[in-house]
Image: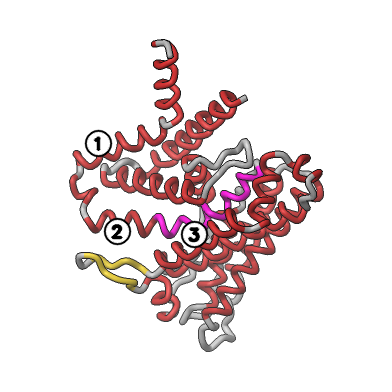
Amino acid sequence: MTEKDKLKKVGDILLNNAMYIIIAVAVVYIAIMRPTFIKLPSIVNILSLTAAKLPIALGIGGCIVLTGTDISAGRVVGLTACISASLLTTVFKIFPGMTSAAPLPLVLLLVIGVGALVGFVNGFSVAKFKLHPFIVTLSTQLIVYGIILMYLMRGVNNGQTLSGLADNYRSFITGTLFSIGGVAVPKYVLYSIILTIIMWIIWNKTTFGKNMFAVGSNEEAANVSGVNVVRTIIMVFMLAGMMYGITGFLDGARIASANANTGLNYECDAIAACVIGGVSFVGGIGRISGIVVGVLLLQIIFTGLTFLAVDANMLYIIKGLIILIACAIDMRKYLVRK
């Protein structure tokens, strides 16, 4: 191997891992400037935030594997959070006739069903009408947002924030799973771990998972091979919707309230995390472990920036740059392979 080839190889390695290098350098800098960043309470907080944002990223990752996306995700989280908060409360403003909170399992199944329904609409439109996922999910995002606003006007609520959640709901989600050095780890961390394991099995050990990657890699070849492309696309979007529903259920209790802005821009964080974690918009490429790492790295960098007292408005610019740079690096890998 010539000196030029060696330099090219080193350059490729650095460029392909540029996002990880940038984040690693940023973390080291933050830790030096703010030593409390690497203290136990901060670490537990980062892990908790990762667990909270992981389900939506696991859902949207499947859409990206299909060379698509889902920008309705955040609004579906908001809708399901509002539904959860309205039924699992001590102050019944949406349904004044209710006298006690609905059963937890019933509400969980309801919000999963609502998410799956939105996912079905998205998947059916993409698969049957050959519409681009961006256009479809942009439309459903607006529709779902309208439904949220109308839902919050029901009863005597008049569009106000839903709060006063039932103790059993909050305890089920945010109760202490265990403590590390006196720092509580919430229960929803366990739920996210369980969801991650389930999604790993679905992606890697089922026929549906193999079909998803086949369709993402080459839809025509998958169809010739006997894969039911329409059903696979619909199922991917429905599975994503179910994950959004679960995210909304968790978020309602985690934040202890829900309103029309709940879930706003969650899809941006999820897409950024997936791309950082190696889920490619080229299609047919992605790993559950990569999504977990992507979500974790994103929460590390955002928490670190908060420690540095960076303007909250600046975070939107940083998120946009992360998505842009990560996608550019991903596309470069694809062009090199070609």
Q: Residue at x 42, y 71 (%)?
A: 173
What residue occupies the far bottom of the structure in this picture? 99
Residue beneath label 2, please?
44
Q: Is residue 127 above or below residue 164?
A: above
Which numbered disc, 3 or 1, marks the residue that appears first in the sequence?
1
Q: Is residue 117 rendered to the left or right of residue 272?
A: right
Indicate the secondary structure of the residue bearing disc 3: helix
User: Are the residues at dot 3 and dot 1 in contact (C-beta closer than 8 Å)?
Assistant: no
Where is residue 199 shown, x and y percent of the image? 55, 59
Report the mark closest to the observer, 3 or 2.
3
Residue named by callout 1: 29
Work out how far the residue at label 1 is from the one at label 2, CA to CA, in angstroms.
20 Å
Q: Label 3 belongs to which residue?
A: 196
Task: Answer with the quarter of the image where residue 207 lies.
Answer: bottom right
Main SS type for the magenta part?
Answer: helix
Q: Residue at x 48, y 48 (%)?
A: 291
